[in-house]
Image (spheres, rainbow, N blue to C red):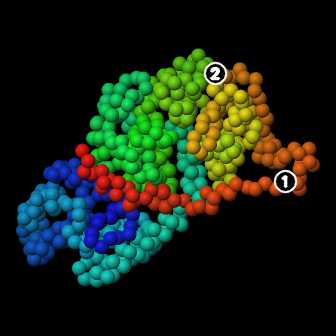
């Protein structure tokens, strides 16, 4: 829903905005983007300000009163010629007639209630719609809008739980598996952008990213006071993207910028729930990777490597100047679609906890009762765990693992971050290992997980020696007790972001 500001503050999230940029003149394309509810209320306000009845206005414009009533109630979209005629009768310009701000506090409330009643939340309640007219008391109008906002807030709060987040993640991962993690519609949008700036081959340079910003109408600004809960902030009023100047950021400036552009190119609105937020994040990550590693160039590179039986994630990383994790993700996008190779990916913390995972090759990831993988402990004999104990942390570690779901070959590396050490691994079923460099490894392991006797139960000799004599002081995992951060963008402080934009809006 879209909320307007008026003198008395409404405590409802306001991330959404009226669709379409504000322009000085109305075009045919603009007419298709009209906010008909807001426009209708403005027409009614201007008509009454002229002391005109519907019959009076009908006679002046040559349209039936019933049609004008539909227009004022936001149930009919006026044609461009009608808008020009109305503007002339009311003695206002098109800008004023189509203004984003409601003319009065009451008009703002009426617009909000009308939108709410047309939304899926109100409709799901099965309640009759309240007829919005001038006879509806102001206090009733305020109460109805307030109740709707509070109901929406409480439902959002209830849904913002770790379990709800896991369920959303499970659902999204299922969709990714069905598509082999390949999104042709995003590839197409990325290709359009690259064509517009004349990028043909090679890594995407910072200069070319600036060209993309210019092409999309954005200017770029480095600041030192970016809200701590954000990686970037986009000002859609002044078409600016703000980035941090901090050297402590773990995220590539290129990736952060391209993800910010992705929201614009892919037409994202403020997320309606955590599931929507996840989908947008996956889409913008995919979009950024599609720009840094264009589909055609990357597929050509991979097919040559496959023909030479020399597929390696580090070669993709080096060829396109991206991180190992980004290269591994991109490989999952293209491997099945273009190379016919099923694959799995893991990002595992040194504690053994899975932070990210994807598979379409039948690997038996550990999961809970709802199918969630993230947060589970991976078998200590898998490549993603064994790599932490390897002396050579510079080279890729390759290993075959015999599991209850078959034999898999995996290649892994470790990376450090402020959250600790992580392993990043790509794996394939044995049938596909012939295409990869490192297939000649002699490292081999066996896993019978989820059988507890595999690695979750101590060996008998250790049990006999220490059972009953060990009492560890467990590290408190306080994050397990915390609810999901609230808000359309989880954990982002709306006031902090708006204050930041206001402070920088006057800068040149």
Q: Name the residue: 33% across, 77% down.
A: 142
* Rendering quarter of residue 178: top right
Residue 57 position (above or below residue 182): below
Q: Nearer the viewer, residue 85 or 172?
A: 172
Q: 52 and 92: which one is in front? A: 92
Q: Quadrant of residue 352?
A: top right
Direction from residue 49 to residue 259 in the image, left or right: right
**Would residue 128 be seen by someone viewing this image from the given angle?**
yes
| Quadrant that contains the N terminus | bottom left
- Residue under label 2: 437
Name the foreground residue: 475 vs 429: 475
Residue at figure coordinates x 35%, y 70% from the top left: 10
- Circles 1, 2 touching at the beta carbon (< 8 Å): no
Q: Which mark is residue 470?
A: 1
Element on which disc 2 rests:
loop
444 vs 425, left or right, is right
């Amino acid at each position: 829903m879209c909320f307007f500001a008026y003198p008395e503050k409404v405590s409802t999230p306001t991330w959404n905005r009226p669709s379409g940029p504000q322009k000085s003149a109305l075009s045919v394309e603009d007419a298709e983007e009209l906010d008909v509810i807001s426009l209708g209320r403005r027409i009614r306000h201007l008509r009454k300000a002229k002391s005109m009845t519907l019959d009076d206005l009908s006679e002046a414009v040559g349209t039936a009163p019933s049609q004008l009533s539909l227009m004022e109630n936001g149930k009919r979209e006026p044609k461009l010629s009608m808008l020009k005629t109305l503007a002339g009768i009311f003695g206002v310009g098109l800008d004023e007639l189509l203004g984003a701000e409601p003319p009065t506090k009451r008009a703002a409330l009426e617009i909000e209630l009308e939108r709410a009643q047309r939304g899926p939340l109100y409709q799901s309640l099965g309640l009759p719609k309240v007829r919005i007219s001038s006879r509806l008391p102001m206090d009733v109008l305020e109460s109805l809008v307030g109740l709707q906002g509070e109901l929406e807030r409480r439902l959002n709060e209830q849904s913002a739980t770790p379990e709800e987040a896991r369920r959303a993640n499970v659902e999204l991962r299922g969709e990714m598996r069905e598509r082999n993690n390949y999104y042709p519609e995003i590839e197409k949008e990325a290709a359009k952008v690259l064509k517009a700036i004349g990028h043909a081959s090679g890594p995407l340079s910072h200069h070319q990213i600036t060209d993309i910003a210019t092409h999309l109408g954005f200017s770029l600004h480095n600041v030192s006071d970016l809200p701590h809960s954000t990686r970037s902030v986009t000002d859609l009023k002044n078409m600016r993207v703000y980035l941090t100047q901090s050297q402590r950021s773990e995220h590539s400036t290129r990736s952060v910028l391209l993800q910010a552009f992705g929201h614009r190119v892919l037409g994202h609105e403020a997320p309606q729930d955590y599931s929507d937020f996840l989908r947008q994040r996956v889409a913008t990550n995919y979009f950024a990777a599609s720009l840094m590693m264009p589909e055609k160039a990357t597929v050509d590179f991979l097919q040559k490597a496959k023909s030479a039986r020399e597929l390696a994630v580090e070669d993709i990383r080096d060829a396109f100047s991206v991180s190992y994790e980004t290269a591994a993700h991109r490989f999952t996008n293209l491997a099945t679609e273009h190379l016919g190779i099923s694959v799995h990916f893991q990002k595992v913390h040194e504690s053994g906890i899975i932070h990210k995972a994807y598979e379409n090759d039948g690997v038996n990831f550990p999961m809970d009762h709802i199918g969630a993988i993230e947060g589970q402990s991976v078998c200590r004999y898998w490549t993603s765990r064994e790599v932490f104990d390897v002396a050579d942390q510079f080279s890729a570690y390759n290993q075959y693992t015999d599991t209850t779901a078959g034999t898999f070959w995996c290649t892994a590396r470790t990376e450090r971050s402020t959250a600790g050490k992580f392993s990043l691994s790509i794996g394939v079923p044995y049938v596909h290992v012939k295409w990869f460099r490192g297939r000649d490894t002699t490292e081999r392991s066996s896993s019978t997980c989820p059988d507890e006797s595999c690695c979750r139960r101590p060996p008998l000799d250790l049990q006999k020696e220490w059972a009953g004599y060990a009492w560890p002081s467990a590290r408190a995992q306080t994050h397990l007790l915390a609810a999901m951060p609230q808000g359309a963008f989880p954990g982002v402080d709306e006031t902090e972001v708006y204050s930041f934009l206001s402070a920088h809006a006057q800068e040149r």
